Amino acid sequence: MSEPHGRLQKPPVLPPGGTVGVVAPASPIHARSDLLRGTRRWEAAGFKVKISPQVFAQDGFLAGSDEARAEALMAMFADPQIDAVQVVHGGYGSTKIIQHLDFNIIQRNPKPFVGRSDITALHLAMARHAGLVTFYGPGLADMAAPRGSEFTAAAVQHALTTCDALGPLPLHPQDGFLRALAPGQVTAPVAGGCLWPLCKSIGTPWQPDLRDKVFFFEEVGEPPWSMDAHLTHLTQAGVLDGVAGVVIGRLKHCEWSEGRPEYPSNLSLDEVLDRHFAHRGVPVLHGIPVGHEADTLTIPLGVAVTLETDAETGRLIFEEAGVGP
């Protein structure tokens, strides 16, 4: 594996009429209609979609063997007719294919790579071993209703097709509330992903280096005690040492509720976040519209952002695009 250092390479912009290649590095797809919905959205915008036959494979909770999933991903990067690579969705299993990837091929054939959730492992590995800016955003099955929305589809298209600075991150279309946990201002590269896979990367060759970075994370279905466990793990492993700022996305179904088999005296999610981040001495913002929801943005990982917070709220500004000419 190669070991790039310094600034990450931006992949070329997705051109008008370009082709999006689709693979399943993690869990299999069950509802083919979700693929059709996402495909129609890309095609309506003038793009082409090429779905790997591997997408329909199944090996228990995986979309085929580790080798087959890795081979399908590598084929998309090696294919000169493919302009961007998007996963079907997350699930589980991305980390199992990393040992089978050729990062030299990815480095020589940089393309926008889009996915979220379990795909975090591949974002981390491509940043570490291919030096590539990648995109934390929806899979093909999450681009259109009911799993996605036009807000989501327009955001991923914009992120992959503009070479201009993306600017301030827009607010969630249904809930524009943002909460600052600590005030400040910093400009630094953004890095991170889904919290559970981030924790599973500790001790691996693709463990992220968050020193002097704005740390981004989101999560779904993890109650406050579990969120506390994940954040404690990151802290005790030293992963958060020297972090320049923290930006937290949508934490869906992560709050305490009576429906959970937990003690009524459980800490609230806000209390857990405050205990971990309010006193780190860096700006911290919670609530940006990136996460496991129908309405979600796509953000390039590895580019410079400015995080500004005051006593109550703040904003996240992308100082550059994630793609190049």
Image (tube, helix red, strand yellow):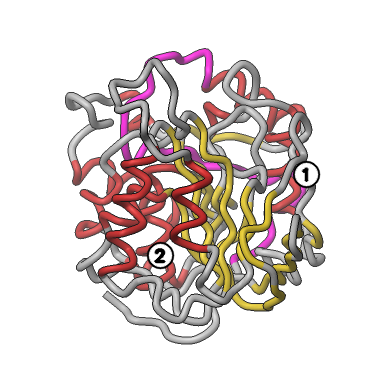
Residue in the picture at 59% in, 52% down: 83
- In this rendering, the answer to whether 270 lies above or below 233 is above
Compared across the picture, whether 118 is left or right of 318 comes to left
State the extent of the magenta-drawn residues as a range.
11-34
Prevalent SS, magenta region: loop
Label disc, if present, on residue 319 of the rendered structure: none
Distance CA(mark 2)–CA(mark 1): 29 Å
Q: 280 or 101, which lies in front?
A: 280
Q: Which residue is mark 1?
A: 171
- Nearer to me, 186 or 257: 257
Name the one closer to the observer, 290 or 66.
Answer: 290
Q: Name which residue lies at 45% across and 72% down.
A: 108
Question: Residue at the spot x=33%, y=41% of the render?
Answer: 225
The x, y position of residue 321, in whole percent, is: 72, 65
Mark 2 and mark 1 lie on one chain; the one further toward the N terminus is 2
Residue 315 or residue 37, whichever sits in front: 315
x then y, percent, for residue 288 = 66, 48
Name the spot of residue 247 as percent of width and height, x first. 59, 59
Q: Give neighbour class at mark 1: few <14, some 14-19, many 20+ (Cα, 10 Å).
A: some
In percent of width and height, residue 197 lies at 33, 50
Label 2 sits on what residue type? Met
Q: Amino acid at mark 1?
A: Leu
Question: Is disc 2 placed on a helix, strand or loop?
Answer: helix
The residue that mark 2 highlights is 126
Q: Is residue 271 left or right of residue 145?
A: left
